[in-house]
Amino acid sequence: MSKNKVTSKTDNKDENSLEENTNIDQDTNTGEVNVDKNGDEDISIEQTVENQNKEIKELKDQLLRSLAESENLRKRTIKEIADAKKYSHIYFIRDLVSSVDNLQRALEAVPDDKSQLSEPIKNLVIGLEIVEKEILNTFEKHSLKQINPLGEKFDYNRHQAMFEVPTNEQEPGYVVEVSQKGYLLHDRLVRPAMVGISKKSEEETTEQNNKENEQK
């Protein structure tokens, strides 16, 4: 009887130790699982934060681009409105200056000595000269300038060469005759001046060629 009791007690101790060991193993495994789960959760959070930061950066970039485009559009619109105010009547001016040209041609046909004219014609001419002066003053008031480049160096931006004039009195490339005056609205050309430009006369050119031949 006593041996059996000892044996059963021993067996009970063994069973208890096995259960304890099993519980320890289970706790250890459970701890490893928890560690793995926490690690996965940390990686998932980091990845989410990284994706969100990337998305924020992309949205910020899109916002900056949109703001820049809006600013460029605003500036372009302001410039277009300003240009429209300055140059919208340029086509009307082109038609108007042709009438002024006819008036000036009529006045140029009048002789310098007006004493030979009858009194009514003389008064008419004086009235037309006053009208011409008033028109030109009005043009100046609205930033429309007349281009009369007689004696100036030829400028292809404002002048249009119609013919060449052989002369020894002026250096080549200068305006020696104005067929039609030009006009400038602010900084934009309404119509170029039609001009004749100087060139070396044939006699002078021949003399230079002869001198060059003699030197050779």
Image (cartoon, rainbow, N blue to C red):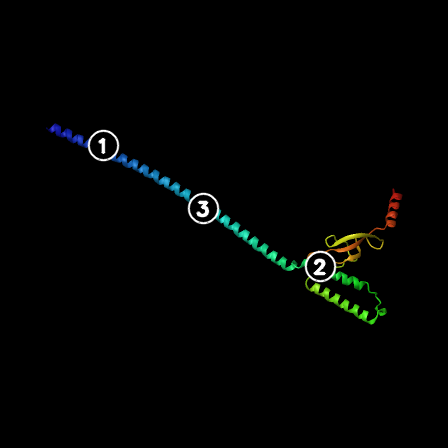
Asked if the residue under mark 3 is in contact with the one under mark 1, i.e. CB atoms within 8 Å, the reply is: no
Q: What is the quadrant of residue 23 in the picture?
A: top left
Horizontal side, residue 115 vs residue 91: left or right: right
Element at label 3 = helix
Above or below for 13 versus 168: above
| Furthest-left residue in this view | 1
Whether residue 186 can be seen here:
no
Earlier in the chain: of badge 1 and badge 3, it is 1
CA gap, disc 2 and disc 1: 115 Å
216 vs 152, nearest the viewer:
152
Q: Position of residue 125 (x, y in %)?
A: 79, 68
Q: Position of residue 155 (x, y in %)?
A: 75, 53
Q: Which residue is mark 1?
A: 18
Earlier in the chain: of badge 2 and badge 1, it is 1
CA gap, disc 1 and disc 3: 52 Å
Q: Which residue is mark 3?
A: 53
Q: Amino acid at mark 3?
A: Asn
Q: Which residue is mark 2?
A: 95
Asked if the residue under mark 3 is in contact with the one under mark 2, i.e. CB atoms within 8 Å, the reply is: no
The mark lying in front, picked from 2 and 1, is: 2
For label 3, count other residues whose C-alpha is less than 10 Å away and answer few (under 14), some (14-19) or many (20+): few
